[in-house]
Image (spheres, helix red, strand yellow):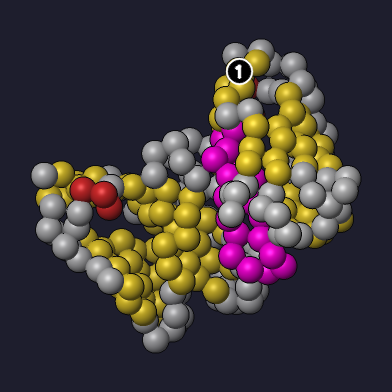
Amino acid sequence: EAGVVQSPRYKIIEKKQPVAFWCNPISGHNTLYWYRQNLGQGPELLIRYENEEAVDDSQLPKDRFSAERLKGVDSTLKIQPAELGDSAVYLCASSLDMGPQHFGDGTRLSIL
Amino acid sequence: RKEVEQDPGPFNVPEGATVAFNCTYSNSASQSFFWYRQDCRKEPKLLMSVYSSGNEDGRFTAQLNRASQYISLLIRDSKLSDSATYLCVVTPSGGYNKLIFGAGTRLAVHP
């Protein structure tokens, strides 16, 4: 069974530039999560989707972050414009309903 | 105060040692409890769930004290391959859908 696939693996951009991350969940998983993990910290939930509906986006900084999951399968997370403090690892996870979450390898973002 | 607090470590132990990690959580309504393992530059992976009665999986034993809002993980006979960061995780409601992670405790096992 293929795991959660994320791309790119690494991204380096200058501040104020836009950036996008992509996630393909495990086949059949209807719930998808985006987390941010800062250095030396645990992951923090940004947004959770059930199929194509965002059911928990309370921690998503909506002034610069956006996400979509148009067909209820893969998802993109966008930051525009990026700030220095956005440097982190962005993790995607998926689950079947409220079952165990499986994480992807993450996208490591560095802002110059 | 953070919802989930852990000693960041690092814990440096020799192979074969027994090591224990502690974790406290602030929300008394927390329902489910887990330990995750995260290797350097890798994704978190579920190590084990934690039950009120305590549970064991091979060399790993997890304990929960709801009255004290305290969770522990004991690793016996440490292996080099146990070197990783151990993340304490709680959920505010039943199920896995809202994971709240601690900052993690780093373990380094040396020969």
Q: Identify the element where label 1 is drawn.
A: strand
Q: Give the residue type at disc 1.
A: Ile
**Is residue B41 visible to us here?**
yes
Q: Which residue is painted at 66% across and 53% down in the image?
A: A26
Position of A41 with respect to B72 (left or right) is right
Q: Quadrant of the C terminus of chain A?
A: top right
Q: Quadrant of residue A91?
A: top right
Q: Which residue is painted at 72% across and 67% down in the image?
A: A97
**Range of residues picked out in magenta:** A89-107
Q: Which of these two is toward me, A5 or A103? A: A5
Which chain letter matches label 1?
A
Q: Which of these two is toward me, A56 or B39? A: B39
Residue that carries the numbered disc 1 in the rendered image? A12
Residue B90 on image: x %, y %: 53, 66
Residue B29 on image: x %, y %: 60, 76
**Count of numbered tags:** 1
Magenta region includes residue A27:
no
Q: Quadrant of the N terminus of chain A?
A: bottom right
Residue B6 on image: x %, y %: 39, 56
Mark 1, Cα crowd under 10 Å, few <14 / some 14-19 / many 20+, is few
Q: Which residue is painted at 40% across and 77% down in the image?
A: B64
Residue most toward the front?
A: A1
Where is B8 relative to A108, above or below?
below
Magenta region includes residue A90:
yes
Q: Quadrant of residue B27?
A: bottom right
Position of B65 with respect to B76 (left or right) is right
Position of A100 with respect to A51 (left or right) is left
Q: Which residue is painted at 13% across and 52% down in the image?
A: B15
Residue B52 on image: x %, y %: 43, 83
**Is residue B1 visible to us here?**
no
